[in-house]
């Protein structure tokens, strides 16, 4: 891919986000995404919590990956704008490090014309604590809450709307999780020795967004806190209580920036999704 800076071999790109994003054909990317317009229904029933509290240590970006820019906008902004384009979402709660709230507002929120109200919650020491912090700012009149990783900038309004509709349309379910079927052969390993090869067709890679009925999600957090349980994602808090969670099939393009190599995958996905030429 021409003119793309690989952050694995050119770490200066991570220190200077404008260098990293230069290979994404920012003009075409911005044009492709400019069709997103903020929407706000008269009586929205869903609140969004966008988790942006990571330190970015594995990614190599001091201060966090959420503010690394793609086509002139922070990763967090691209994520938040997709939620802003869903009319049923009446509140966006961005969870970020408390000592950087002003910076996140200045760089990722305030310069952009959000229609949906945006508030900031302080991140906790763990992802679960951060999610709970965001949940505390969600008023009781929102029947549903959607959780999303701020470092998944390619989430689309259609996927968000479909996941919300899945929960609304299934009265017996407590939530829905976007996931993708596992494509790799899995091995069970004990002490460095392979002891089994499970059927991969029953394994899915969990992503976000994850949508829940707000009441059960609050109860799940309360139970986890009182019992000292720490889950690996939001859905696991409800699953352990016997909750019924549906799966919504997502795409492998719904990439989360975690390590520098992920940037190359994201770049390729952007090129493919928006028809850019390298």
Image: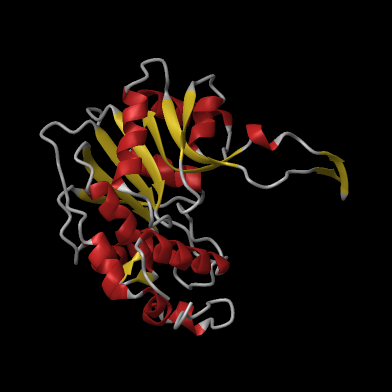
Quadrant containing the C terminus in the rendered view: bottom left
Q: So how many labels did they put on this image?
A: 0
Residue 241, given in percent of the width and then of the height, sits at 53, 21
Outermost residue, left side = 42
Q: How far from the left and from the top, in percent, is residue 239?
A: 54, 26
Horizontally, residue 172 falls left or right of residue 229, namely left
The residue drawn where x is 14% and y is 37% is: 41
**Of 165 and 184, which appears nearest the observer?**
184
- Could you tell me which residue is drawn at 35 percent across and 42 percent down? 159
- Colouring scheme applied when the structure was drawn: secondary structure
Between residue 225 and residue 52, name the one nearer to us.
52
156 or 2: nearer the viewer:
2
Q: Residue furthest top?
A: 172
Q: Position of residue 48 (x, y in %)?
A: 31, 42
Relative side of 115 to 217, left or right: left
**Viewer can see residue 64:** no
- The answer to whether residue 53 is seen in the rendering is yes
In the displayed structure image, the side of residue 123 where residue 114 appears, left or right: left
Give the quadrant of residue 197: top right
- Location of residue 162 (image quadrant): top left
Residue 143 as seen in the image, left or right of residue 3:
left
* Residue at (87% x, 50% y) in the render: 192
């Amino acid at each position: 891919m021409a003119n793309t800076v690989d952050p694995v071999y050119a770490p200066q790109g991570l220190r200077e986000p404008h260098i990293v994003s230069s290979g994404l054909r920012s003009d075409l990317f911005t044009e492709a995404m400019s069709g997103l317009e903020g929407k706000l229904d008269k009586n929205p029933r869903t609140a969004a919590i966008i988790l942006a509290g990571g330190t970015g240590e594995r990614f190599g970006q001091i201060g966090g990956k959420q503010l690394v820019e793609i086509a002139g906008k922070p990763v967090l902004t691209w994520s938040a704008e997709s939620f802003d384009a869903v009319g049923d979402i009446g509140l966006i709660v961005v969870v970020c490090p408390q000592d950087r709230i002003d910076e996140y507002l200045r760089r990722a929120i305030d310069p952009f014309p959000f229609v949906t109200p945006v508030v900031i919650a302080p991140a906790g020491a763990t992802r679960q604590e951060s999610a709970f912090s965001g949940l505390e700012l969600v008023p009781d009149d929102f029947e549903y809450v959607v959780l999303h990783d701020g470092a998944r900038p390619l989430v689309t309004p259609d996927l968000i709307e479909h996941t919300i509709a899945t929960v609304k349309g299934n009265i017996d379910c407590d939530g829905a999780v976007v996931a993708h079927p596992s494509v790799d052969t899995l091995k069970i390993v004990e002490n460095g020795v392979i002891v089994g090869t499970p059927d991969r067709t029953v394994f899915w890679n969990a992503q976000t967004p994850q949508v829940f009925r707000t009441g059960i999600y609050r109860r799940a957090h309360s139970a986890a806190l009182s019992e000292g349980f720490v889950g690996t994602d939001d859905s696991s808090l409800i699953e352990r209580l016997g909750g019924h969670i549906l799966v919504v099939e997502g795409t492998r393009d719904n990439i989360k920036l975690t390590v520098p190599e992920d940037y190359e995958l994201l770049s390729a996905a952007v090129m493919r999704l928006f028809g850019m030429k390298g």
